[in-house]
Image (spheres, rainbow, N blue to C red):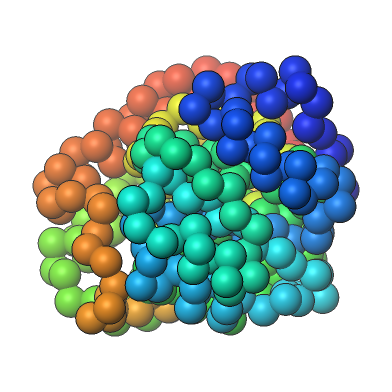
Amino acid sequence: MATRPFATEAEVGRLLPEERAAAAAFLAAHLPGEGAPLAVVIAAYNEEPTVAEVVAEIPREVGGLASEVIVVVDGARDATATEALSAGALVCDVAANRGQGAALRLGYWLARARGAEVIATLDADGQYEPLELEQVIEPILSGRADFVSGSRRLGSELTTDGVRHAGVIFFGALISILIRQRITDPACGVRAMRAEVTEAVTLEQAQYQASELMISAALNGFRLTEVPTTMRDRGNHATRTKKGSNWRYGLHFARAALTTWNRDRKGPRRRRR
């Protein structure tokens, strides 16, 4: 399952211009090929109140794999980077704010450069349970799946936003039709995948990337599954959501999903191991 560590000047040069200096500094401090087999990637934009607690809650061993936490700070104007560092994360501090999708894409790249075999994600706002990472990566370790998404519908959702809940059901049905596989929660912030998935799929969305990643993985022949997870309510100390209004988020999510499906649907559906 091991992935190839890489970080040549040419490969750094293929990153977005605003990412290159931050990525080079990160890899100078945290050498390529010397990372843990499990990398937990977190994109963080102005998450000073919560990011340290999230990082501290992530076990240093998950499912028998040593883990490390990579926080990509996406142009934050507060002390997000300092807080993440204080909690033990490896931090890539990008000066420009580009969006969660772009920050996660860079985080996947850094994780592969460090030699990760499995890459997981969590949100920085504390809405997901870090201890549930073990059940998220289990289907990968047992060889049953290449990409695993958490599902609040299979597990529990402690939030009270009725419109957002209806959106999860609607978009789960839409993506189920597009990829011909039942999906109950297409936008859960906790997920895991074999590292090669992040290199094989096309990731272009700067912000609304959850549907792009899931649909592209399915249409590239990777095996998908869901596991029950918990979505906690946003605490009083959490920052406000960066996703905008429910209707705006839904519109952009739909556009990202349909654009990805139209882009990838004619490609070869190779059965992955």
Q: In the figure, is residue 76 to the left or right of 69?
A: left
x and y percentages locating residue 161 in the rendered image = 16, 70
Which residue lies at the image location 74% right of the left edge and 67% below the top edge?
A: 67
Viewer can see residue 246: yes
Q: Is residue 227 placed above or below 259 in the rendered structure?
A: below
Q: In the figure, is residue 152 to the left or right of 30?
A: left
Which residue lies at the image location 75% right of the left edge and 49% below the top edge?
A: 29
Q: Is residue 18 placed above or below 46 in the rendered structure?
A: above
x and y percentages locating residue 174 in the rendered image = 31, 44
x and y percentages locating residue 6 in the rendered image = 81, 34
> In which image quadrant can residue 120 be found?
bottom right
Which residue lies at the image location 34% right of the left edge and 33% below the top edge?
A: 256
Q: Name the residue nearer the viewer: 112 or 145.
A: 112
x and y percentages locating residue 226 in the rendered image = 53, 63
Quadrant containing the C terminus in the rendered view: top right
Q: Is residue 91 placed above or below 213 in the rendered structure?
A: below
Q: Is residue 135 placed above or below 196 in the rendered structure?
A: below
Number of marks: 0
Q: Name the residue nearer the viewer: 242 or 1.
A: 242
> In which image quadrant can residue 55 be found?
bottom right
Which residue lies at the image location 64% right of the left edge and 20% below the top edge?
A: 14
Viewer can see residue 192: no
> In which image quadrant can residue 131 be found?
bottom right
